[in-house]
């Protein structure tokens, strides 16, 4: 069986475990779920109707089986706060969060790879020390604080970028980039700080190995040694960490979406918590966990692209 198919099949039980944990988490909420969602001022008929909709009048096992059946049909119920299907709300918000996370990771890798490689090639030089100091500062600055500074500098005092909001890529690519620029910088620079240290350490470790000295003794140029041999080995741990960080970005954009007024998945999750709309919370958590699992699969496949010696037969 091909590796990709095996890994895809392995995703199914993982998602099932996450889905079960998400379902059970809402079942053990103290108190009446219907009262929590509608509030103590809700009328008895409204509470009864919501209990019937959620299946609270049926045994737990029956509710679980019915919920899995609806999940297989991509039906996560109807939001109490928005009176819309949860899947529709998630589908509207997901592209925003994915756009922000991908743009932030592009910023992180765009900074970390060249700076980390240059710092490793000139270890303990002024450039290396500046890179280490810069990454330390980047790690120390909170993302929301950097986001506010960027808003004050490049949206308020010098209005180059929009202050709030989001533009769809299909509608206006230029506006899409303008709206994403500052959130991507705020999120990406923090990730770049950690990745720069990792790239530096991985490349430096490979540069000290015997095979590098052998390649140099054969007359290969420094760029060729770096491109053909060093990066091939050094990129494997970088890919692993970058994949995990992208997963954390997909689920961790709540604060930055609030700061920049982005209508993403994180903001929807926060609004669901504020509105006590447990179906939105359930759907958002399940979506984030599923994306994280699929992302790990993508990272596994990228290993072979980064190093052709890796096979999955």
Image (spheres, rainbow, N blue to C red):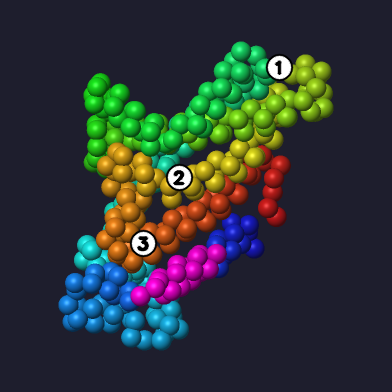
Name the quarter where the N terminus is drawn.
Answer: bottom right
Picture quadrant where residue 73 is located: bottom left
Q: Which residue appears at 61% of the width and 18% of the height?
A: 129
User: Where does label 2 land, which residue?
Assistant: 249
- In the image, is residue 142 above or below residue 46? above
Percent coordinates x, y for residue 109 in the rendering:
51, 32
**Percent x, y of residue 146:** 39, 31
The answer to whether the residues at label 2 and label 3 have Cβ atoms under 8 Å apart is no
The residue labelled by disc 1 is: 221
**In this rendering, position of residue 246 left or right of residue 169:** right
First in sequence: mark 2 vs mark 3: 2
The reply to whether residue 178 is in sight is yes
- The residue sitting at 80% across, 22% down in the picture is 213
Q: Nearer the viewer, mark 2 or mark 3?
A: 3
Please give the residue where the numbered disc 3 appears in the rendered image: 281
Instruction: Tell me, yes or no, whether the highlighted magenta stretch contains residue 65.
Output: no
Provide the residue span drawn in magenta: 14-31
Residue at the image point whose x is 70% and y is 26% from the top:
204
The CA distance from mark 1 to mark 3 is: 55 Å
State the separation of the CA atoms marked 2 and 3: 18 Å
Q: Residue furthest top?
A: 126
Q: CA distance from mark 2 to mark 1?
A: 38 Å
Q: Position of residue 170 (x, y in %)?
A: 27, 42
Label 1 residue SS: loop
The label nearer to you, 1 versus 3, is 3
Residue 59, how many percent across, how many down? 41, 86
């Amino acid at each position: 069986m091909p590796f990709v198919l095996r890994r895809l099949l392995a995703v199914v039980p993982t998602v099932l475990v996450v889905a079960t944990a998400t379902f059970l988490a809402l079942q053990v909420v103290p108190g009446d779920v219907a009262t929590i969602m509608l509030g103590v001022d809700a009328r008895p008929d409204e509470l009864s109707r919501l209990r019937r909709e959620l299946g609270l009048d049926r045994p737990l096992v029956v509710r679980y089986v019915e919920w899995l059946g609806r999940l297989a049909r991509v039906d996560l119920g109807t939001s109490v706060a928005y009176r819309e299907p949860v899947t529709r709300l998630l589908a509207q918000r997901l592209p925003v969060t994915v756009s922000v996370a991908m743009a932030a990771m592009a910023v992180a890798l765009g900074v970390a790879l060249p700076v980390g490689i240059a710092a490793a090639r000139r270890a303990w030089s002024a450039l290396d020390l500046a890179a280490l100091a810069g990454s330390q500062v980047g790690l120390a600055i909170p993302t929301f604080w950097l986001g506010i500074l960027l808003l004050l500098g490049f949206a308020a005092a010098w209005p180059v970028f929009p202050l709030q909001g989001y533009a769809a890529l299909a509608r206006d690519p230029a506006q899409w980039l303008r709206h994403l620029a500052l959130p991507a910088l705020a999120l990406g620079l923090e990730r770049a700080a950690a990745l720069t240290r990792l790239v530096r350490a991985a490349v430096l470790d490979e540069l000290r190995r015997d095979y590098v000295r052998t390649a140099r003794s054969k007359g290969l140029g420094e760029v060729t040694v770096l491109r053909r041999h060093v990066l091939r080995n050094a990129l494997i741990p970088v890919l692993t960490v970058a994949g995990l960080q992208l997963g954390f970005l997909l689920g961790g954009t709540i604060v930055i979406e609030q700061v920049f007024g982005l209508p993403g998945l994180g903001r929807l999750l926060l609004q669901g918590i504020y509105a006590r709309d447990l179906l939105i919370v359930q759907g958002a958590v399940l979506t984030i966990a599923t994306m994280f699992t699929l992302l790990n699969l993508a990272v596994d496949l990228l290993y072979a692209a980064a190093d052709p010696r890796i096979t999955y037969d």
